[in-house]
């Protein structure tokens, strides 16, 4: 509940939720979605967007957000009332596959260099990450997986020599044969 | 325009005017400028759409709002790029918050100059994205006719609201093929208008068992059209339940009906607020649990089951958790409720209802709208009462500005029909009333249109008197002049120890002379004994009038739910303590 008059000691817990939003790919539609979030004070944890049906000019937006259940329900309703929005689906309520791609740059220096290099490669193998670039003292790994796996991988690399990370944010799709 | 037409080629400017004709637009409120000259040229060459030249673009939007709210039609605005568009922003936001259907055309610099900081360029769609229901930038002439017809559809469908169409000047000059409204269907926007039957049944089950019910109605009833008001009256008659309404819903239920409790909320009646607080079943029809209605949320109607009918799904469970939410148009849902009520021969708990009315009548006996009248000085409440008494037999429409006078008007001017009361509820825009009255008068040329104003608010859009003069619109501006921004002063008394920082209306104009300067009539009155005669003189004058009614200066608008308090903690007119001691530190932080 959001109001000037609400009791701030609300007992609802904060949850993460993934929404899939099907929109007309018209100019400004992304600003409309992100502006609704900022204007109403909601969080965006990640947001990905791309045209997925070129003939119909439809784009699919996957937005990961967090809040209390009542705030999350309000976000769903607010998304749904935007004029260019065709459909909003709460993927967290379904069994859904969620994947994120990360490019992780790791560099080693100092006396333990070769040991760190070996460890980085071992961890990459364990996580199923691809090595997409290598120099004598650095790697770039490409990892795709659920949010939690990417988080764990990045945290481990931080101990070895993390330089920078580029993440796409989540793409998600419901399991089974049915479409949206 | 029902005959099938051959393909017609015309310029973008001509398409805009043609689309207005096809959408049955009779009046456009606007102001010309460089980026809309082609459209003004197209308007010049036809006679079916009349343009009303305002004196400021904010006035154009408020006029269109008054026009729309009093007629049920979509209001149309035409302004130029840059400052024309930015001046319209307050009006657009006002229309968004009060769900008023508008289509606003804005001129834009030619497409090849967009983004170059050209003269009178602004990012109109960027600026208005947050204050419209939807907006468009038309980049190609091929899209223009479709976008215009979509815009009218979006503005009036579902929860109504303002839509902006930004048209670059080269698109206005370009020529293309026009398509009519019948060929346009929106791709994604399909608001749900019929309520879910199972939920309607569940609501009726609650209603039949209710022991202390109340109808809490809002602007959604007005927006659903006169049929919704008729159905509400029928349902209220069948059930015998008490009815209260928000500021935006006044007139949907007749104030002369014994089941009417008066307005609820911060300045609502004692009986309306206590009925809300103590009820066991609340039936919210087209209202949105605004903070001015609920007061302290955790103490809001603690023991009731709540039914909420609203066309906007996001209104349901937004601030107040309800037991039965029904998404749909109020008229459709009420019709379905009534059909089932009659078909299944439902009945109410008459014995319990009798006891409930007994309680309500005790609250009513407190006479919470009472005030101490005076023979020496005009009390603002008395002025509104006399204005109502002397106009109620006429075909009267009322607009207001924002502040104490607005609340006194809501309390003491009574409405028996919908669409008669135009006020800025959600945004609270000072300066709304005069341009809105101009729009109302344009829609109802033979009606008596009164803007109940304060001396501070009226100065915010005073320039529109010139519009009234130009079009010979006989609007009556009735100023309750207490030489204060009265509501600001009242809150300073409540919250800030009576330190009246900047709330005194210093160096006021002579309103009688000001009226004369605008080719209108000026009347001043400060004597209760002469008030009736002066009001009659105002009504009988065939042109615009500014009535400067000098009233008691430090009168507070009561009753009042102080901020941070619950419905059963109202300050009543017989309150004798120090009003500054009522609100605690936490309440002071609330607006």
Image (tube, rainbow, N blue to C red):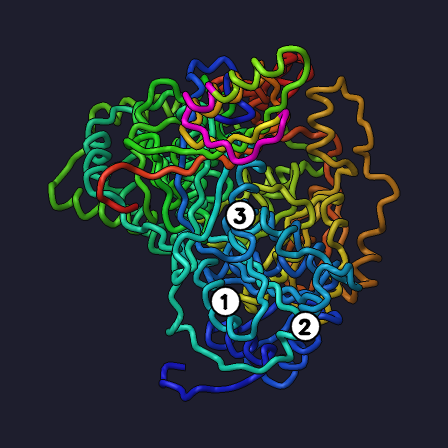
Q: Where is residue B308 in the image (x, y as percent from the top left)?
A: 34, 35
Mark 2 is surrounded, within 10 Å at the Cα level, by few (under 14), some (14 to 19) or many (20 or more) other residues, namely many
Extent of the magenta region: A122-137
SS state under label 1:
helix
Disc assigned to residue B147: 1
Total labels: the figure holds 3
Q: Mark 3 points at which residue?
A: A30
Q: Which residue lies furthest to the right in this view?
A: B507
Which chain is indicated by disc 1?
B
Q: Residue at x 38, y 66 (%)?
A: B185
Residue A110 image-quadrant placement: top right
Q: Which residue is drawn at 38% across and 18% down?
A: B302
Q: Where is residue B534 in the image (x, y as percent from the top left)?
A: 69, 53
Rounded to the nearest angstrom, the CA distance separating label 3 from label 1 is: 19 Å
SS state under label 2:
helix
Q: Position of residue B147 (x, y in %)?
A: 50, 67
Q: Mark 2 points at which residue?
A: B169
Mark 1 is surrounded, within 10 Å at the Cα level, by few (under 14), some (14 to 19) or many (20 or more) other residues, namely some
Q: Which residue is drawn at 50% across and 32% down?
A: A131
């Amino acid at each position: 509940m959001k109001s000037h008059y609400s009791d701030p000691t609300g007992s609802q817990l904060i949850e993460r939720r993934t929404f899939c939003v099907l929109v007309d790919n018209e100019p400004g539609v992304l600003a409309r979605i992100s502006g609704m979030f900022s204007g109403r004070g909601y969080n965006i944890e990640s947001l990905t967007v791309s045209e997925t049906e070129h003939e119909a000019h439809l784009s699919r937006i996957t937005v990961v957000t967090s809040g209390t259940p009542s705030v999350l329900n309000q976000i769903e309703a607010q998304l749904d009332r935007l004029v260019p929005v065709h459909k909003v689906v709460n993927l967290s309520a379904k069994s859904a596959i969620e994947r994120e791609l990360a490019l992780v740059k790791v560099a080693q220096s100092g006396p333990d260099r070769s040991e760190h290099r070996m460890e980085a490669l071992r961890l990459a193998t364990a996580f199923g990450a691809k090595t997409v670039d290598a120099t004598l003292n650095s790697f770039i790994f490409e990892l795709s997986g659920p949010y939690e796996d990417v988080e764990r991988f990045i945290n481990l690399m931080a101990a070895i020599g993390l330089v920078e990370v580029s993440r796409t944010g989540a793409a998600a799709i419901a399991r089974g044969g049915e479409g949206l | 325009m029902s005959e099938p037409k051959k393909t017609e080629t015309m310029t973008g400017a001509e398409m805009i005017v043609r689309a207005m004709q096809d959408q049955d637009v009779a009046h456009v409120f606007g102001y010309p400028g460089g980026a809309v000259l082609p459209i003004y040229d197209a308007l010049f060459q036809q006679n079916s759409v009349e343009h009303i030249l305002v004196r400021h673009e904010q006035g154009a939007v408020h006029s269109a709002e008054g026009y729309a709210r009093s007629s049920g039609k979509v209001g149309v605005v035409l302004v130029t790029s840059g400052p024309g568009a930015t001046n319209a922003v307050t009006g657009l936001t006002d229309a968004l918050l009060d769900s008023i259907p508008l289509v606003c055309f804005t001129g834009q610099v030619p497409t090849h100059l967009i983004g170059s900081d050209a003269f009178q360029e602004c990012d109109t769609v960027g600026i208005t994205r947050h204050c419209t229901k939807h907006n468009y930038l038309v980049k190609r002439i091929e899209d223009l006719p479709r976008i215009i017809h979509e815009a009218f559809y979006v503005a009036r469908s579902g929860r109504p609201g303002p839509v902006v169409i930004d048209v670059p000047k080269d698109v206005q000059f370009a020529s293309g093929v026009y398509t009519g409204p019948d060929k346009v269907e929106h791709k994604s926007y399909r608001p749900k208008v019929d309520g879910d039957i199972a939920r309607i049944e569940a609501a009726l089950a609650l209603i039949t068992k209710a022991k202390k019910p109340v109808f809490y109605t809002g602007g959604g009833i007005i927006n659903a059209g006169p049929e919704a008001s008729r159905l509400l009256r029928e349902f209220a008659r069948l059930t015998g339940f008490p009815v209260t309404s928000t500021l935006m819903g006044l007139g949907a239920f007749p104030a002369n009906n014994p089941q009417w409790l008066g307005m609820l909320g911060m300045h609502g009646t004692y009986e309306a607020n206590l009925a809300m607080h103590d009820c066991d079943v609340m039936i919210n029809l087209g209202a949105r649990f605004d903070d001015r209605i609920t007061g302290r949320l955790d103490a809001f109607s603690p023991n009731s089951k709540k039914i909420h009918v609203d066309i906007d799904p996001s209104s349901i469970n937004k601030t107040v958790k309800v037991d039965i939410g029904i998404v749909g148009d109020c008229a459709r849902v009420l019709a379905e409720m009534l059909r089932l009520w009659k078909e299944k021969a439902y009945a109410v708990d008459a014995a319990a209802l009798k006891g409930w009315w007994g309680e309500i009548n005790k609250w009513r006996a407190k006479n919470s709208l009472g005030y101490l009248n005076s023979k020496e000085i005009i009390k603002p409440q008395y002025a509104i009462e006399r204005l109502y008494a002397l106009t109620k037999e006429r075909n009267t429409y009322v607009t207001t500005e924002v502040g104490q006078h607005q609340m006194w008007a809501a309390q003491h001017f009574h409405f028996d029909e919908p669409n008669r009361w135009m006020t800025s509820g959600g945004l609270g825009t000072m300066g709304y009333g005069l341009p809105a009255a101009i729009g109302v008068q344009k829609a109802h040329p033979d009606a008596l249109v009164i803007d109940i104003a304060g001396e501070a608010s009226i100065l915010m859009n005073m320039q529109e008197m010139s519009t009234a003069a130009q079009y010979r619109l006989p609007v009556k501006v009735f100023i309750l002049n207490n030489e204060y921004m009265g509501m600001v002063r009242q809150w300073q008394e409540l919250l800030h120890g009576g330190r009246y920082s900047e709330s005194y209306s210093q160096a006021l104009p002579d309103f009688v002379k000001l009226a004369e300067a605008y080719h209108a009539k000026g009347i001043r009155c400060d004597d209760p004994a002469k008030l009736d005669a002066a009001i009659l003189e105002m009504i009988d004058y065939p042109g615009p009038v500014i009535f400067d009614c000098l009233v008691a200066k430090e009168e507070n608008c009561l009753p009042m739910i102080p901020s941070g308090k619950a419905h059963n903690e109202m300050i009543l007119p017989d309150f004798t303590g120090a009003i500054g001691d009522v609100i605690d530190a936490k309440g002071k932080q609330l607006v």
